[in-house]
Amino acid sequence: MKGSKYQGDDMKRCLGMLGHGKCIRGGTNITIKKNPLILITITSLASMLSIAEPVDPYSPMVGKNFPRNVFFGDTHLHTNLSPDAAAGGNRLFGHDEAYKLAMGKAVTAHNGRSVRLNRPLDFLVAADHAEYMGLFPALDAKNSQLLATDIGQRWYQMLQDGPEAAASILIEFGRALGSGEDLIKSDSFQQSVWQTVIDKAEAYNQPGVFTAFIGYEWSSSRGGGNMHRIVLFKDGADKTSQITPFSSFNNNRPHALWKFLANYEKTTGGEVFAIPHNSNVSAGLMFAPVDSDGNTMTVEYVKQRVKWEPLLEVTQFKGDSETHPAVSPDDEFADYESWDKFASFSNKKKQEAWMFEREYARAALKNGLAMSADIGGNPFKFGLIGSTDSHTGIPSPDENNFWGKFSWHEASPTRVMERFVNIPDIPQFEWEMAASGLAAVWAQENTRASLFDAMRRKETYATTGPRMRVRVFAGWDFTDADLNAPDWVERGYRRGVPMGADLPAPSNNQQVPVFMINTWKDPDGANLDRVQIIKGWVDKQGETHEKVFDIALSDDRVVSPVTGKAPPVGTTVDLSKPTYSNDIGEAHFVTRWTDPTFEIDVPSFYYVRVLEIPTPRWTAYDAAYFNLELPAHVPMVTQERAYTSPIWFTPEQ
């Protein structure tokens, strides 16, 4: 066949004659012997002769690899390896129990009741504190490496006096954390505990079914403020076992953590990033306009922050950090599960007015735009996720299945009115805990690599617990035909950008951004009240602004031209049972929105907020189950929501 000009169809016909002994093309006889080696040779030859797909393949999905699925998980769960979790009553729930729960199995809680998630998670990060990780299980097991230290011996003896000694150890631990002093000073103990974390994640990781990420929490509490970060690895044991977790004892400045992350990638070839969380009690430090040493931010500092911290945990058990009435006074939904009694982990540091601008996500997103003009880069360019920060080992953000922040606050008749922790300096009560939240990730598949890559590109959103599906694209020429087309997602990627991305400049200065938004209710939950777009921008004088647009409303409601607000959706909540009905609201919103305030030379960002109709809060479920009469100041109704990662527009220079 040397020199033949066979085309794909000709060769296929020829190969189809194998077994008949002869193939004829254009009067040329080709004898084919019935020999398996000949078959292999000819099949390989067919590949070399480029039997290519047609220009328009029959299968519409050929060559397309955009994300089609949303996966829900928790990137911030503590087990009994976290010393505060163990001191707070969690002596039973380690990584085995946490992973079993996340995968849908039932376990027995400390109070003897059986617990199971309403629905399994798709992924989980068992993110225990690096500082004193594994302390209490090691004391209980008389770990030789720990008992070889003076502090290990003393704490072990204290525990022999009774479980209440755990609170005293926790106070010592907290003081050491604040001072940056590692009282144990045992590298071998730390490495052995870290290896346990790795081994458990590897054992439960099932690519395509359930993703167990390897990770931990770096817990800096500089100045009493919560500056904690979750460190999340893309990799498995081969790379993560090469390091020991970098803790705030090593250094409590974020830029030192970033240096560690960079060195990890350089030395192992792996990938990693960090997720700041709980910024609402950061004492004004999380989004300060200076670097972590108090110096003016440099372009290099900004680049490092944006690279190593692509996401923010915007909602969790300790309140919601999207926004606050102090920074968004015109937003009627700003005061959601607010924690603003104190600035940090102690009432000795009171919340002051200037702190709010530096603690809430929306304010930070606006300030980042303004700072970009001076620095040459936006330091606060992050996507949004939610997670629980549960210290019980139970990753449940559902209102009707809430198991408390700490294990001493598992479901009981008294927990609602108990203190958040039994430390006088913290005047927070358990009823103030928010049953929140979840991380939602648009990815190709449920694997470490795919989910990690999606989180790094910020194609994520946060929910306060429900699993509503939210998808948004921004472009310059989307039409209603695009929005209603069966391939609208493909069109969104082809001619626009998804959540978490930058909208490129338009082809002409007359164009304005067009958004395609599809939202679906949680199939097991409440209907949707409305869809909003939150816009932030910086004017030509350098002043920041924000505006909330109601772009889709249920039940034929419209925005008042006088007040600029839509009437409330109403409520179907019956607290006596408690229950609600989906007689109001919508199951699905599909809408296209064009920004009526757009200016081509003004930097801006947009994110979508979706609200459910009112539903019973976890306190209402407790009141009904335990037949309680709760004080009037305890909230009993909630309005769950989702926040997408922003889409940014930066004018061409």
Image: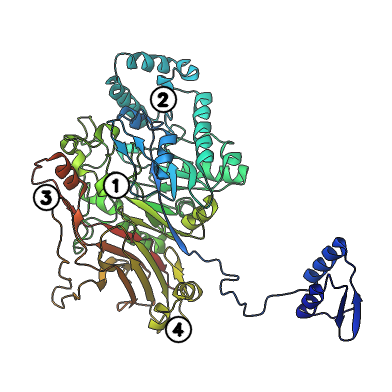
SS of the residue under disc 4: loop
Marker disc for residue 284: 1
Q: The residue under label 4 is which amino acid type? A: Asn
Q: Quadrant of the N terminus?
A: bottom right
Mark 1 or mark 2, which is nearer the start of the sequence?
A: 2
The first of marks 4 and 2 along the sequence is: 2
Q: Residue at x 41, y 33 (%)?
A: 94
Q: How is the image coloured?
A: rainbow
Calculate the distance from the C-alpha at mark 3 to the C-alpha at mark 2. 42 Å
Residue at horizontal 30 percent and vertical 50 percent from the top: 359
Q: Which mark is residue 571?
A: none
Q: Residue at x 37, y 59 (%)?
A: 368
Q: Tell me if residue 569 can be seen.
A: yes
> Could you say where residue 8 lies in the image, as x and y percent from the top left?
76, 78
The vertical placement of 54 against 362, above or below, is below
Front of the two marks 3 and 2: 3
Give the secondary structure at mark 3. loop
Amino acid type, residue under disc 1 in the picture? Gly
Please report whichever mark, 3 or 2, sits nearer to the chain's N-terminal start.
2
Residue 501 vs 599, above or below: the answer is: above
Residue highlighted by disc 3: 576
Give the labeled residue for mark 4: 508
Of marks 3 and 1, the one in the foreground: 3
Contact check, label 3 and label 2, Cβ < 8 Å: no
- Give the label, 4 or 3, closer to the camera: 3
C-alpha separation, residue under disc 4 versus residue under disc 2 = 63 Å
Q: Nearer the viewer, residue 275 or 225?
A: 275
What SS does tag 1 mark?
loop
Instruction: Tell me the kind of residue under disc 2.
Output: Pro
CB of mark 4 within 8 Å of CB of mark 2?
A: no
Q: What residue appears at the point 36 percent right and 48 percent down from the top-left corner?
A: 387
